[in-house]
Amino acid sequence: MIQLFKVAKSYGGGTPALADINFEVQKGEFIFLTGPSGAGKTTLLKIMYRTEKFDQGQVLVNGMNIGKIPDRKLYLLRREIGFVFQDYKLLVKKNVFENVAFAQEVIGANKKRIRFKTWEALKNVGLTHKKDSYPQQLSGGEQQRVAIARALVNSPKIILADEPTGNLDPEISLEILKLFEHVKKSGVTVVFATHDQEMIRSRNHRVVVIKRGKLVTP
Amino acid sequence: MTSSAHTTLSNIKSNLQVFLVSVATITVAFSILGLFLVIFVNLNSFLTTWSKHVQLIVYLEDDISKDQRGVLEQLISTNPDVESMTFISKESAWANFKNTFSTKKSDFIDELKFNPLPSSYNIKFRPSPERFTKIRNFAELFKEREGVESVEYGEKWLRAFEKFMLFIRIFLLAVGGLLSLGLILIISNTIKLSFYSRQEEIELMLLIGATPGFVRIPFMLEGMLQGLLGGIFALALIKFLQLYIQVQFQGSLETIVRGMEFQYISQPIILILLASSVFIGWMGSYIFIRQFLSPKFK
Ligand SMILES: Nc1ncnc2c1ncn2[C@@H]1O[C@H](COP(=O)(O)OP(=O)(O)OP(=O)(O)O)[C@@H](O)[C@H]1O
Ligand SMILES: [Mg+2]
């Protein structure tokens, strides 16, 4: 489903953000992407979503050659992927329900479907009671769950989650993890970036470790 | 499409003031343009009305022979563009002249012991688009003829008027072009402001899978709506002005030129004005999209 071959990326500084990255994620697989802060996890996920360019190598996602997609066709890639941003990217002028529904609106879903899917996604992250709140009225963890609901609402084939439990206490973190695992069961490919070593150890999903832009064997 | 229209409306609502200012600017600019057009149209119709009265007068020398007159009459009656011809003799010209000025009881005229007026042919031409040219050519033909003293057809007037109309035409084009350019910039700027107020949202849209068209269309609609509203308001404004002038001055206009009335812009021109206002709106949004939005489609 996702293939990276000799991918390298530099932000222009001395040491490259990523160097010689090779790995593959099978369809329906769940992997943890981990490594210390600044290792290049976010950069790697952004490359797969093509919000960041890379300098060398090949990246294939769902059969699409990331480096070769013309800008006007980019939406085709983005619609296959649910991305949980590390900084959430919620719209402050929209309430919880509208924020989640937004992802449905931009792909042109009809009203009835939008209502149904949004409600379902909010139920999944346990936030139906907050549907009318605005982002500033929510805790960090609640905002994170809104971001997760928005990534799930379009039923994507792939989920790229950038530290989706970074702000959550262990109990809710586990709930969220279970949610992603549940999604995985329906055939969705999940890349789950996290610092939480305990969480990683508690499961036996494949772990990809990255340090200073390079893959290391765990 | 309905969702695009919806987005357009909420865009406008969130930036209503800027939108209204822009529409008002377009209205003013189009009113100016429209007023010039109205003036142009009316001058043109004045010219047409006036030109109906233009005729060619061929003044004859006093000692013209019968044969020479026969040649001239032959020339006139065989010309297909001539509608009618009247011969006015020295005597009837003099009588007419005296009649016209009889109220003044001018001693000067009464004291004249001889008739200073020549006899003449008054020639009316059939209406046709090239009427002026035909009259002019025909007049040139007569000037050189024997027995002809002079010809007259309001030549200087005609030339001046034609030149003036040409000038107005060029002026209209230039002013129209400049105003359009300004409007395009104003509209693209208004749309830019409407974009800024929703920048975060639009960037997120593209980030999570909106097609470029989905993002573009509401801005297109916003630009075209601005143009259209400006155009409609301007036309309404000109219409009011026309009605006012009609009510106030129709009487006096009639006395200046018979059959002349103050006209509104004709229907095709209304449609052209509206179409160009929409086009200008579209251009405004197009420029915004090219410069601003498209670079974000990545
Ligand atoms: N936009 C950018 N411009 C310049 N350098 C950047 C940019 N984004 C990231 N970097 C650098 O690239 C390296 C990798 O950053 P990245 O955000 O991918 O790390 P990360 O593994 O996600 O870290 P964290 O766990 O803290 O989120 C870091 O050294 C960072 O400073
Ligand atoms: Mg990161």
Image (spheres, helix red, strand yellow):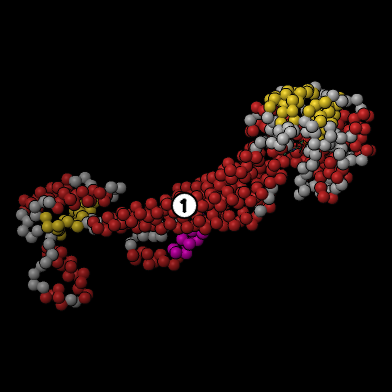
Query: Nearest the camera: B203 or B132?
Result: B203
- Residue drawn 69% across and 43% down? B202
- Asked if residue B243 is among those painted magenta in the image, a careful observer would answer yes
Ligand 1: quadrant of the figure = top right
Residue A2's spot in the image, x, y percent? 76, 25
Chain of the residue where label 1 is placed in the rendered structure: B
Tell me if I can see residue A160 in this picture. no
Q: Report the quarter where the N terminus of chain B lies.
A: top right
Tell me if I can see residue B27 in this picture. yes
Residue of label 1: B178
Query: Nearest the camera: A86 or A109?
Result: A86
Q: How many marks?
A: 1
Q: Which amino acid, by three-letter code, is at mark 1?
A: Leu
Q: Main secondary structure of the magenta part?
A: helix
- Residue drawn 56% across and 57% down? B24
Circle 1: element type: helix
Locate residue A108 relative to residue B97 in the image: left or right.
right
Can you tell which quarter of the image residue A151 is in? Answer: top right
Extreme residue toward the front, this view: A14
- Residue drawn 25% across and 49% down? B133
Query: Nearest the camera: B202 or A58?
Result: A58
- Asked if residue B270 is among those painted magenta in the image, a careful observer would answer no
Which segment is the magenta one?
A: B235-246
Residue A84's spot in the image, x, y percent? 80, 36
Residue B129's spot in the image, x, y percent? 30, 47
Tell me: residue A32, above or below residue B287. above
Q: Report the quarter where the C terminus of chain B lies.
A: top right
Tell me: residue A29, above or below residue B248. above
Locate residue B29 relative to residue B58 in the image: left or right.
right
Tell me: residue B239, above or below residue A179. below
- Residue drawn 87% across and 37% down? A165
Residue A94's spot in the image, x, y percent? 77, 47
